[in-house]
């Protein structure tokens, strides 16, 4: 994926290479992977926080998906994470 994206960015003139396209693609791949891992860690933290409300969720007093989305958005906003 990163190879194709790197090639397209170069071809369309969005990026001017000072090194090799392979090096650019590797850096792009690393950046995307890091960003995705930030969201994965945030998702894990939200799931752990919701475990405290497991009984209420099971009784149907709280919608898990709605609460997950709200809590994730709140934490992302507080931490300056762009989703």
Image (tube, grey):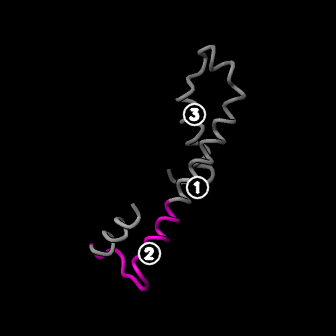
Which image quadrant: the N terminus?
A: bottom left
Query: Mark number for residue 6?
Result: none
Say which of marks 2 and 3 sits in front: 2
User: CA–CA distance between discs 2 and 3?
Assistant: 36 Å
Report helix, strand or loop for mark 2.
helix
How many labels, in total? 3
Mark earlier in primary sequence (1, 3): 3
Mark earlier in primary sequence (2, 1): 2
x and y, in percent, of residue 48 in the image: 69, 36
- The residue that label 2 is drawn on is 24
Observer-nearest of 42 and 79? 42
Disc 1, disc 3: CB below 8 Å?
A: no
Report helix, strand or loop for mark 3.
helix
Residue 78 painted magenta:
no
Report helix, strand or loop for mark 1.
loop
Quadrant of residue 73 within the rendered picture: top right
Observer-nearest of 26 and 62? 26
Q: Is residue 71 left or right of residue 17?
A: right
- The residue that label 3 is drawn on is 68
The answer to whether 31 is drawn above or below residue 44 in the figure is below
Query: Mark number for residue 80?
Result: 1
x and y, in percent, of residue 12 in the image: 27, 72
Residue 14 painted magenta:
yes
Disc 2, disc 1: CB below 8 Å?
A: no
Instruction: Name which residue lies at 30% across and 69% down.
Output: 8
Say which of marks 2 and 1 sits in front: 2
The answer to whether 17 is drawn above or below residue 70 in the figure is below
């Amino acid at each position: 994926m990163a190879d194709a994206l790197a090639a397209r960015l170069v071809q369309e003139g969005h990026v001017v290479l000072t090194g090799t396209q392979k090096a650019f693609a590797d850096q792009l791949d690393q950046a995307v992977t890091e960003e995705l891992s930030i969201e994965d860690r945030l998702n894990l933290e939200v799931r752990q926080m919701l475990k405290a409300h497991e009984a209420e969720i099971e009784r149907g007093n709280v919608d898990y998906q709605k609460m997950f989305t709200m809590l994730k958005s709140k934490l992302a906003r507080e931490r300056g994470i762009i989703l």
